[in-house]
């Protein structure tokens, strides 16, 4: 027997799940149905967000312990981005069913591989800087998960964001780790600015980055309390996974699964039941929700910088803020416009402002019903 | 002898000069060195401003009495726009020398053709609506010019524009025409907004549209008081015009001519000397100085309208103001931006605002010295 089989540490039983779904419609026209946010390079690094997520997890989990869940139609793109991904670890959805089904199916597959498996979910389209701090937070969370808790990693807020949900932390749990781990009292929705300000001043609140770490069986049992039929179906699909019956079982059960976020099936009920802990982390994190976020990422929050994304972008501007995203080498000239957002693609030009960048989602919604679908 | 030779009225001795120079750099990147403002369609009519100017003058003067003065390099474009233009009426400049030289040369050529010739200059790149009122104003001005006056056509202001110069009108000249003709007390430069407001409230001020009508000899003699050497050269070039020596004489004299606007060599001195009269006109006039003007022209000043210029333009917008100029059929999407100016050409995209549209000229100036010349 190898050493890891003799005395496996919790981290040796840890598998990362990367749910790679979601178009990110607030990033249209850069994001499209065929070019979802997780396939985009939004940091100018040359890597897609999915690839950066994989690389960030590599020091924590080897390829055989990273699972990607994505839509059928993104299979080829994901395989191209992640040549190291094992075939049996690419889980495809026939239609999108939100995070409970995506993460739940991965958990159900994992608990069959190893009844003591620990699962952690990490979105494919977030940006994290300072990876050592990230790794340390994950290790702490994995150890807590091994004790039977459902752990989340919360980010210490750097400003009163109204774009993120918050975690209200309870007493420190020195019994689980020496530093930075707390009970979760509750999850709170995206707040108004004034409330966000009190959260930041109070200090007992963290940004909810949507990272959940738990034993696969603990996670599924928690989900089953809220959605027993769903978990039953997920375990049935998992039992057939990799066999001749896989396709037919999934085809029969998947379409009927509810579309529901894991926050509602696992995180909130677990917090109410006192089974949820959070690791308070210090790394830079952003969900890159809109072009204002992309601008802030590129300028690293410096005021007085115009952000430019695009290898061949040419910009002439008297503006000291805002962002130009260009897929071509033609000149973008800005005169007297501050905080502007210009996204210059082959078939669509978007002009908006950082303050209005969230409203792009509404435009995309209107285009879906009004005949602009071929551009989405 | 034909009837017109027997008893020529002043209008029979009237020749229109169209100075077609000036790139119109505040309309960049639509206007370029090779696509100056007068060759553009800025009204969506399908015609260039030059062609529209020609058509507006056609009821006043037949082709043999319309002269166009333009740069050497625009010869082919002008001929294409104006197939009716006679070869001897196309006057080309080897290099641009502002309006005194351009109009002065036309006047010098004309006084040789007919010592009683009356000349009127009309810019190639202005927009005028209600052509009947325009014709009536020109006729009144021509009759005053026949009496030895230098006449200008001033536009009754519709709002306190800070983008135009003004004419301060003096006493009515009922001896010259029954209505709408006045002495000119002075020409005043583009005013600040508050001063412009008092001009409009006072009522005795007109917009200076740069239209000057005079006997060719009167105009040249007036110019000679200020610039005797210049007028001497212009008459020498004109004397050689159409002969074998034309090119060599122009080549010798033209480069040394001063670059000076006719306002300073003719209009202002004539006003001071009491030789200037103005016709107060009621037609809609605009010099289309920047994209804010283009927007107002296209929406005819209606608030709550987004202006769109471009045959194939596709725009999706929640804005109720501003302008999109597009040379392609790709979608321009505007979210939460009011009064925006978007000019989408093959190699340059400009984004500015109506309020800042004048500053495009400064950007073009900076590009000239900083290496963006190929895009100008």
Image: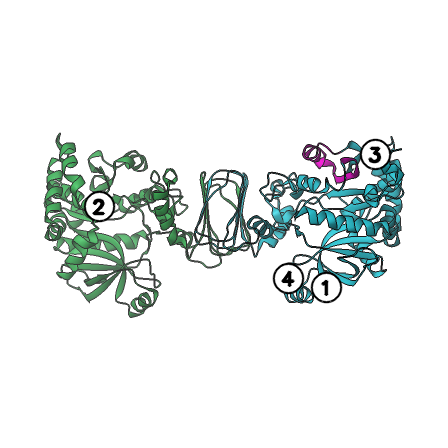
Chain colours: A green, B cyan
Q: Is A74 left or right of A240, judged from the image as shown? A: right
Callouts 2 and 3 in the same chain = no
CB atoms at circles 3 and 4 under 8 Å apart?
A: no
Q: Crowding at label 1, few (<14), some or many (≥20) Cα neighbours within 10 Å?
A: some
Nearest to viewer (mark 3 / mark 1): 1
Observer-nearest of B263 and A291: B263
Mark 1 highlights which residue?
B204
Observer-nearest of B371 and A174: B371
Callouts 3 and 4 in the same chain = yes
**Does B62 sit above or below residue A266?**
above
Mark 4 highlights which residue?
B160
Nearest to viewer (mark 2 / mark 1): 1
Chain containing the residue with disc 1: B
Nearest to viewer (mark 2 / mark 3): 3
Per the image, label 2 sits on a secondary structure element best described as strand
Percent coordinates x, y for residue B253 in the rendering: 85, 41
Q: Earlier in the sequence, mark 3 or mark 1?
A: 1
Nearest to viewer (mark 2 / mark 4): 4
Q: Which residues are magenta?
A: B63-85
Q: Earlier in the sequence, mark 3 or mark 4?
A: 4
Distance CA(mark 2)–CA(mark 4): 67 Å
Picture disc at residue B247: 3
Distance CA(mark 3)–CA(mark 4): 46 Å
Chain containing the residue with disc 3: B
Q: Crowding at label 4, few (<14), some or many (≥20) Cα neighbours within 10 Å?
A: some
């Amino acid at each position: 027997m190898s050493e890891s089989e003799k005395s496996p540490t919790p981290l040796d039983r840890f598998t990362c799940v990367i749910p790679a779904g979601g178009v990110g419609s607030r990033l249209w026209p850069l994001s499209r149905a065929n070019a979802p946010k997780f396939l985009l390079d939004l940091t100018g690094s040359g890597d897609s967000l999915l690839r950066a997520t994989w690389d960030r997890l590599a020091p924590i989990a080897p390829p055989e312990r990273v699972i990607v869940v994505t839509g059928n139609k993104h299979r080829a793109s994901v395989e191209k981005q992640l040549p190291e991904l094992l075939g049996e670890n690419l889980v495809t959805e026939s239609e999108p069913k939100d995070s409970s089904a995506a993460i739940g199916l991965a958990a159900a597959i994992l608990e069959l591989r190893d009844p003591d498996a620990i699962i952690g979910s990490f979105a494919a389209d977030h940006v994290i800087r300072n990876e050592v701090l990230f790794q340390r937070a994950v290790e702490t969370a994995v150890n807590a998960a091994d004790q039977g808790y459902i752990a989340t990693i919360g980010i210490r807020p750097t400003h009163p964001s109204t774009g993120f949900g918050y975690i209200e932390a309870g007493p420190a749990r020195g019994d689980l780790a020496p530093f930075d781990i707390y009970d979760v009292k509750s999850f709170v929705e995206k707040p108004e600015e004034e409330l966000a300000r009190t959260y930041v001043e109070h200090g007992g609140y963290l940004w909810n980055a949507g990272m959940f770490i738990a034993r696969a069986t603990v996670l599924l049992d928690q989900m089953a309390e809220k959605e027993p039929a769903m978990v039953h179906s997920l375990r049935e699909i998992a039992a057939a996974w990799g066999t001749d019956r896989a396709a037919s079982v999934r085809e029969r059960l998947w379409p009927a699964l509810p579309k529901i976020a894991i926050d509602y099936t696992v995180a909130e009920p677990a917090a109410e039941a006192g089974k949820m802990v959070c690791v308070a982390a210090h790394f830079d994190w952003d969900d890159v929700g809109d072009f204002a976020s992309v601008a802030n990422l590129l300028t690293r929050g410096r005021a007085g910088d115009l952000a430019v994304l695009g290898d061949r972008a040419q910009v002439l501007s008297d503006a000291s803020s805002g962002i130009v995203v260009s897929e071509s080498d033609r000149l973008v000239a800005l005169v007297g416009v501050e905080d502007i957002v210009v996204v210059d693609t082959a078939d669509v030009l978007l002009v908006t402002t950082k303050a209005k960048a969230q409203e792009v989602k509404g435009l995309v919604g209107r285009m879906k019903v009004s005949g602009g679908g071929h551009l989405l």
